[in-house]
Amino acid sequence: MPRSTALDANAIAPGSLILSAVVGITLATGGFVIGIGATGLTAGTTSFWYLSRATGFVAYLLLWGSVTWGLLLSTGMGRAWMGPPQLLDAHQFLSAAGAGFACFHSLVLMGDRYVSFPLRAVILPFGGSYEPLLVALGQIAAWLCLLLIASFHVRRHIGGRAWRRLHHASFVAFWLAVAHGLLLGTERTTVWANMVYLTTASVVTFLTFYRVLVTKVFSPCFSAATPPRFHPPSR
């Protein structure tokens, strides 16, 4: 097997396993929550609300980690710490884990008797009556994350250029998640949460400008100055 093919297979396989596990756990959790909520045993408890808040914040941090790791990979800044295959594996892991926590964050609200999110309101943007616009920001971000995860497995079919263009949606997903958390999150009034949002948004902004400006300006110079990796033997 050629080396490039082996690397591609090794890069995709861990993501497939992680994605399968995330989907399985999410569906099992959703079924459990729907069953418990339907029995009426959750009346008066706020456990589901607190679970949703906690997992939503974790999902945001994982999404930030995924976007940051992707930028470190695309700009080459992360190669000082680990190789591209390891960076790609970490990027895929953070993406899948973030999508799983985002799904949990949404599905667990079906068990809360106060907010009372039906399945339609969880799945479809603008499908509920509770802050439909602000909720939709998070829902669209989650759907974009799932789309990007799926794109890893069809990259060979759509081509590298189309795949990279599609990955620009990760920035849309991140900033939608920022708006969702800042405008709707219960912790938005706390200092520590605002500091987290400010810090993570600043890191992504810096790396984005570095990728757009510095990489594009200097990459032709680097390419011209860098000798080819392999040289034909002298005769």
Image: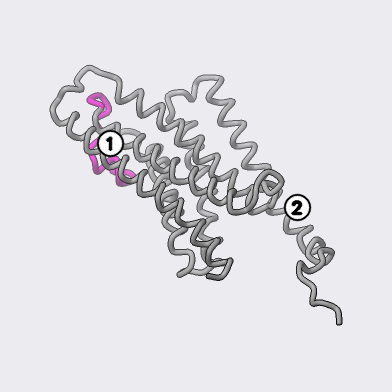
User: Would residue 118 appear left or right of 15 to someone viewing this image?
Assistant: left
> Hey, which residue is sitting farthest left in the picture?
39
Q: Return the residue at label 2.
A: 214
Residue 214 pos. (x, y %): 75, 52
> Hey, which residue is sitting farthest bottom in the picture?
235
Tell whether position 18 is magenta: no
Q: Which mark is residue 29?
A: 1
Q: Residues within 10 Å of mark 1 (few under 14, many from 20)?
A: some
> Hey, which residue is sitting farthest right in the picture?
235
Q: Which mark is residue 217?
A: none
User: Would residue 65 appear left or right of 98 to someone viewing this image?
Assistant: right
State the residue at coordinates (48%, 42%): 176
Q: Which residues are magenta?
A: 112-129
Label 2 or label 1, whichever lies nearer to me, is: 1
State the residue at coordinates (43%, 30%): 184
What's the CA distance linking mark 2 and mark 1? 44 Å
